[in-house]
Image (cartoon, rainbow, N blue to C red):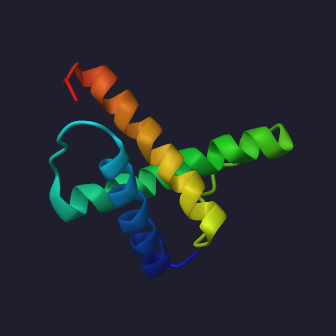
């Protein structure tokens, strides 16, 4: 997937994950993009583990299913980040 598609997927997934996750998250638009892109990689890896039984570090695609996987990965990323830094959501 090209860089523009990653940016679009990152914005969509990051914005949806921030809207779903309780509390206030800072970071602005760049933080939202990075959250979504990391979430797409994490969600894609977990999806490939479930689907094939082996981890493939590829991100989710720019489709409805890919956005859903990326949003779930971004929510998981937010949870892990706040658990590791002990910040209250």
Residue 7 x/y as whole percent? 39, 72
Viewer-proximal residue, 74 or 38? 74
Residue 70 x/y as whole percent? 52, 54
Q: Is residue 84 above or below residue 10?
A: above
Q: Is residue 61 above or below residue 58?
A: below
Viewer-proximal residue, 26 or 21? 21
Left or right: residue 62 versus residue 77 is right
Residue 36 x/y as whole percent? 40, 56
Residue 52 x/y as whole percent? 84, 44
Give the number of marks.
Answer: 0
Q: Quadrant of the N terminus?
A: bottom right
Question: Which residue corresponds to the image point at 24% horizontal and 23% vertical from the top-left?
Answer: 85
Question: Which residue corresponds to the image point at 38% horizontal and 31% vertical from the top-left?
Answer: 79
Q: Where on the picture, by quarter, is residue 68? A: bottom right
Question: Which residue corresponds to the image point at 38% horizontal and 50% vertical from the top-left?
Answer: 17
Left or right: residue 17 versus residue 62 is left
Q: Quadrant of the C terminus?
A: top left
Q: Is residue 39 above or below residue 61?
A: above
Question: Which residue corresponds to the image point at 74% horizontal and 47% vertical from the top-left?
Answer: 48
């Amino acid at each position: 997937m090209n860089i523009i598609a990653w940016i679009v997927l990152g914005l969509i997934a990051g914005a949806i994950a921030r809207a779903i996750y309780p509390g206030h998250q800072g970071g602005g638009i760049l933080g939202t993009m990075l959250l979504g892109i990391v979430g797409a990689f994490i969600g894609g890896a977990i999806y490939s583990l479930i689907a094939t039984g082996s981890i493939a570090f590829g991100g989710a695609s720019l489709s409805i299913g890919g956005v859903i996987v990326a949003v779930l990965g971004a929510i998981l990323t937010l949870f892990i980040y706040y658990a590791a830094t002990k910040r209250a959501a």
